[in-house]
Image (cartoon, grey):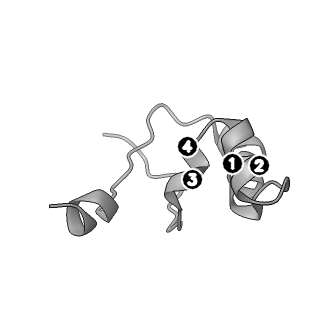
Amino acid sequence: MGEIVGAAFLAHVPTIVLPEAQRLALNDGRESTLHTGLHDLKREVLDALRPDAIIVFDSHWFTTVA
């Protein structure tokens, strides 16, 4: 049996998956703090924990798109 080494509840906006040029164009040339924060989370937490698996539960599209 596995071990749960962490859990998180995160917000997101659809623009974080856009190519960098599009994200910056939509935000007056600035990067969103959410985008940089998620990269920080990966580097500071996930790289340190080195989990075998990451499970994501996301209801965003299910609840907002028919």
Query: Residue 56, percent across and down?
Result: 38, 50
Q: Residue tagged by mark 4?
A: 17
Mark 2 vs mark 3: which is more N-terminal? 3
Mark 2 vs mark 4: which is more N-terminal? 4
Q: Residue tagged by mark 2?
A: 24
Q: Element type at marker 2?
A: helix
Q: Element type at marker 4?
A: helix
Question: Which kind of residue does numbered mark 1 sit on?
Answer: Arg
Q: Residues within 10 Å of mark 4 (few under 14, many from 20)?
A: few
Mark 1 vs mark 3: which is more N-terminal? 3
Mark 4 vs mark 1: which is more N-terminal? 4
Q: Quadrant of residue 26?
A: bottom right
Marks 4 & 1, CB-CB < 8 Å contact:
no
Marks 1 & 3, CB-CB < 8 Å contact:
yes
Q: CA distance from mark 3 to mark 4?
A: 5 Å
Which residue is drawn at the image coordinates 26% and 67% (left, top)?
64
Q: Residue tagged by mark 3?
A: 15
**57 horizontally vs 27: left or right:** left
Q: CA distance from mark 2 to mark 4?
A: 12 Å
The answer to which of 1 and 44 lies nearer the viewer is: 44
Q: Is residue 42 above or below residue 6?
A: above
Which residue is drawn at the image coordinates 77% and 62% (left, top)?
33
Question: Which kind of residue does numbered mark 4 sit on?
Answer: Val
Q: Residue tagged by mark 1?
A: 23
Marks 1 & 2, CB-CB < 8 Å contact:
yes
Which residue is drawn at the image coordinates 68% and 52% (left, top)?
38
